[in-house]
């Protein structure tokens, strides 16, 4: 039994919560039914009810809460803003844990315009930092993801997430963490523990063992502050889209673009989405069309999967794959990069078209002149998409890219979408399998084939995105979108996720991150790596109070 298990059954919750209330104040220690239900909501249909929710104001209060929890033998689960869509949302791995909601800690502590970095707390959102930089006139952009304006930078970085810009491999652009340990001590990594250090947020490694990685995808400490590098505003940005007509053609396109990623011509993270991924960004599941199609094409084998004829009609005009990326630099540099992209794609069936601010302005004018015609509506939609892509490229988050999470939601997109979009609150069903694979076309096709066989077997459409997260690898995001209000479909979705996860794992395509429901599957063989992780966990958190089960396969298995 773990140290945490040994403490269960003899915990005085009332005394513990009284001590925690004294630490943070009554308004910030929440135990009411509505709050607990809100934090138990999950797009993965795995609601996990917490003991209580504490909302500390600073690292000192986090440390105090951790010490109180250790004294009483209560597990704590930290989160930044609780918007880890598809991977656990605001839920702990196991029930009955104290949620440490760090969203009150939302200070932008420092921005250095000359050296292009910021120091931020966990509650700082993509919208907050982007707006702050713009309002204060800093010539800097922060990388952002498509997860929405209200998501946390630190929360995503702790999961080793990635965005869009040249700084999109986010963990590589972090220096200097402040971490609350299970003992209640506060650790400064890198050079930060030397008070006189002048490069604490400039050189991540410091001197001695490099510790920062221990606190990402782990339960060994609570990161309460870090330095994040910002991107100097580019003179020129062009977005490019490359449509690939047939499924098998994508391999040659990937192989053609890889040298440009390796030599630095393509500095941003390129995203490669299949037709359904593009389709789901602009509409939800076509229930009415499915009913009409059944009358002519026969009933679909599964209500969650589009029949081939209907899929073909809905995806008319879309390529089987679309590559999306951005070019940054001076006007001359971008012009040279455009020529390099065109040259690289010769001999493939991919054709790039480039979107500039001028082309967007002209498109918007033409869209207005075309009025309410079909061509006008289509052009305005294309311009809106282009404008959103430009925003993301410049670090301005846009919630429209969350539309895919709503694909199977019975009510479709909520009123006012994308403002305030919250897939967990809105009842969306969403599970992700996220393998990493070599940056080769043959590997992309192999992963897609393995996944598609399971998606078809369980009756779901495969939404696939592969992103060039660095110069040598692709990060896949394979989406199981399902109707959370349908118990049978929910069970089938979980079975589909588990089958895809297992097949890819066995084939050597290991995920770069996993949801709470899949933590136990990370250590099927009990290897030396996870034994070493367990030894480090035992040294840093001997009582096992920090997020038991999080990237801790043995403990996660006990939660089921």
Image (cartoon, rainbow, N blue to C red):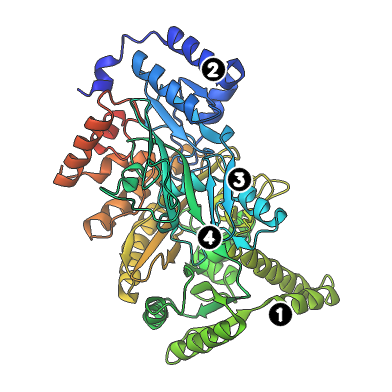
- Image coordinates for residue 64, horizontal then vertical, percent: 44, 21
Q: Is residue 212 left or right of residue 50?
A: left
Is disc 2 in contact with disc 1, using a CB cutoff of under 8 Å? no
Q: Nearer the viewer, residue 16 or 66?
A: 66
**Residue 124 sits in which quadrant?**
top right
Report, in whole angstroms, how far the alpha carbon at label 2 lies from the one at label 1.
53 Å
Local SS, label 4 = loop
Local SS, label 3 = loop
Identify the residue under disc 4: 115
Q: Could you classify mark 3 by the number of other residues whose Cα lies within 10 Å: few (under 14), some (14-19), or many (20 or more)?
A: many
When the figure is inspected, residue 381 is found, relative to residue 197, above or below; the finding is below
Sooner in the amino-acid sequence: mark 4 or mark 1: 4
Q: Could you classify mark 2 by the number of other residues whose Cα lies within 10 Å: few (under 14), some (14-19), or many (20 or more)?
A: some
Report, in whole angstroms, how far the alpha carbon at label 2 lies from the one at label 4.
44 Å
Q: Kindly tell me whether residue 297 is visible in this rendering.
A: no
Q: Kindly tell me whether residue 465 is visible in this rendering.
A: yes
**Residue 313 sits in which quadrant?**
bottom right
Sooner in the amino-acid sequence: mark 3 or mark 1: 3
Sooner in the amino-acid sequence: mark 2 or mark 3: 2
Residue 143, label in figure: none
Identify the residue under disc 3: 150
Identify the residue under disc 2: 31
Q: Which residue is painted at 48% across and 31% down in the image?
A: 59
Identify the residue under disc 1: 359
- Image coordinates for residue 103, horizontal then vertical, percent: 56, 35
């Amino acid at each position: 039994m773990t140290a945490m298990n040994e403490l269960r059954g003899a915990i005085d919750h009332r005394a513990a919560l009284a001590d925690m209330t004294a630490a943070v104040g009554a308004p910030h220690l929440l135990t009411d039914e509505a709050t607990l239900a809100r934090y138990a909501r999950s797009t993965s249909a795995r609601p996990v009810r917490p003991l209580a929710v504490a909302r500390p104001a600073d690292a000192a209060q986090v440390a105090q809460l951790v010490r109180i929890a250790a004294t009483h033998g209560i597990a704590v689960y930290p989160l930044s803003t609780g918007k880890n869509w598809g991977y656990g949302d605001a839920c702990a791995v196991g029930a009955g844990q104290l949620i440490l909601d760090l969203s009150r800690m939302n200070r932008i502590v420092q921005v250095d315009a000359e050296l292009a970095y910021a120091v931020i707390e966990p509650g700082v959102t993509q919208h907050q930092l982007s707006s702050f930089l713009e309002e204060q006139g800093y010539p800097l952009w922060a990388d952002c993801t498509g997860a929405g304006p209200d998501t946390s930078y630190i929360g995503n970085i702790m999961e080793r997430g990635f965005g869009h810009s040249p700084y999109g491999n986010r963990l590589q652009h972090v220096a200097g963490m402040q971490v609350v340990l299970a003992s209640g001590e506060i650790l400064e990594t890198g050079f930060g523990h030397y008070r006189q250090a002048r490069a604490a947020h400039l050189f991540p490694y410091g001197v001695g063992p490099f510790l920062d990685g221990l606190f990402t995808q782990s339960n060994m400490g609570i990161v309460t502050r870090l330095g994040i590098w910002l991107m100097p505003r580019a003179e020129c940005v062009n977005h490019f889209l490359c449509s690939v007509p047939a499924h098998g053609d994508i391999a040659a396109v990937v192989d053609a673009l890889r040298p440009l990623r390796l030599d630095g011509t393509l500095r941003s993270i390129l995203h490669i989405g299949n037709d359904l991924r593009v389709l789901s960004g602009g509409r939800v599941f076509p229930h009415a069309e499915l009913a009409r199609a059944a009358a002519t094409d026969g009933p679909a084998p599964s209500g969650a999967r589009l029949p081939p004829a209907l899929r073909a009609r809905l995806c008319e005009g879309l390529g089987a794959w679309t590559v999306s990326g951005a070019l940054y630099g001076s006007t001359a540099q971008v012009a040279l990069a455009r020529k390099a992209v065109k040259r690289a794609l010769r001999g493939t069936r991919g054709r790039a078209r480039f979107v500039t601010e001028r082309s967007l302005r002209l498109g918007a004018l033409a869209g207005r002149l075309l009025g309410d015609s079909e061509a006008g509506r289509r052009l305005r939609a294309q311009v809106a998409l282009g404008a959103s892509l430009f925003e993301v490229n410049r670090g301005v988050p846009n919630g429209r890219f969350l539309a895919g999470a709503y694909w199977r939601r019975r009510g479709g997109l909520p009123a006012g979408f994308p403002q305030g979009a919250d897939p967990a609150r809105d009842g969306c069903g969403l599970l992700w399998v996220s393998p990493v694979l070599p940056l080769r076309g043959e590997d992309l096709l192999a992963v897609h084939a393995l996944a598609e066989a399971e998606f078809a077997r369980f009756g779901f459409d495969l939404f696939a995105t592969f992103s060039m997260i660095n110069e040598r690898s692709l990060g896949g995001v394979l989406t199981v979108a399902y109707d959370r209000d349908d118990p049978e479909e929910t069970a089938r979705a979980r079975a589909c996720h588990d089958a895809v996860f297992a097949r890819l794992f066995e084939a050597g395509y290991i995920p770069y991150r996993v949801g709470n429901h899949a933590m136990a599957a990370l250590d099927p063989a009990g290897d030396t790596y996870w034994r070493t992780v367990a030894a480090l966990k035992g040294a840093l958190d001997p009582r096992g109070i920090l997020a038991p089960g999080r990237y801790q396969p043995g403990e996660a298995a006990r939660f089921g």
